[in-house]
Image: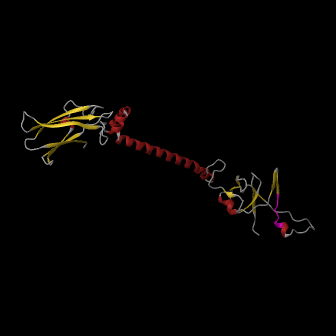
Amino acid sequence: MPDERYTRCPGCATVFRVTQEQLALRSGQVRCGQCKTVFDGVEQQVSLATAPPPEGGNAPTDDAASAPTTIPSRDAPAVESPPDMRSEGPTPVAGEEAAGVPYEDRFSPASRRPRRRARAALYAAAMAFLLLLIAAQAAFHFRDAVAARWPATRAPLARLCDMAGCAIGPLRDASMGYLSIEASDLQADPAHRGLLILTATLRNRAGWSLAYPHLELTLTDAQDRVVVRRALAPAEYAGGTADLQRGIEPNGEIAVKIFIDASATSQAGYRLYMFYP
């Protein structure tokens, strides 16, 4: 008959049958199937060996041998004979915290726990650094928009750009629609044959400065076919007094007047667009 091992739950005093494999699975740590108490099954082992029958007594019958056995325990109530381990017996601790120690640290050597905490702290620091790096890259890429919409950030961004070798310029309108050509006209100069005069008004409706755009002038014939096309940089139409680095002031406008030599062409109409290169 194989050697039977039993352990007693210190919480409810219930006795269970255990195997050596179960005790070795988590270094003896098991959970009571009755009250869920976690305890050391090795330290709480008990013996259920029955005393020999009195001399001259009758040997127990099979029914008596299989009847439940109770074991007195200090002040604990009587304990029933151990149920089968598959139903209500103690189970190795797994998946929960026991005695206030996280499960992953419960059965690991104490020397490994500080390393796990250090590794977790290193991961947290690395994540924080990556998030900070992403935020810095976004601020660098959209520095013009950030400085335009939140003027308080212009000074620190300018200091960062001094170190990084970049510059903060006025925001480009792109597709926001704040910058528009209010009016334009193309007329022949009566005093000079073949000379055209282009006039236009650019208006900024935004609450922040916008960069000067490039202008594209297209001359067309009577069938609206392109005769000549010319791109004009801000320095060519904004005038010498314009501060191109500051851009067009918030809710401001600029007047454009350009003289164009068209003596070698014949045109009937024109188109004027603005764009950012």
Q: How many marks?
A: 0
Instruction: Magenta stretch: give its range.
Output: 65-70
| Drawn side of residue 272 relative to residue 85, left or right | left
Residue 67 colored magenta?
Answer: yes
The colour scheme applied to this rendered structure is secondary structure
Q: Main secondary structure of the magenta part?
A: loop
Q: Assign the C terminus to one quadrant of the image.
A: top left
Residue under the point 13% across and 48% down: 223
Q: Quadrant of residue 252?
A: top left
Q: Nearer the viewer, residue 70 or 201?
A: 201
- Residue 17: percent from left, percent from top: 74, 61
Q: Quadrant of residue 206?
A: top left
Residue under the point 84% across and 68% down: 63
| Drawn side of residue 193 relative to residue 111, left or right | left
Q: Assign the N terminus to one quadrant of the image.
A: bottom right
- Is residue 72 placed above or below 128 in the rendered structure? below
Residue under the point 24% across and 39% down: 213
In the rendered image, the residue lying farthest to the front is 222
Q: Nearer the viewer, residue 254 or 75?
A: 254
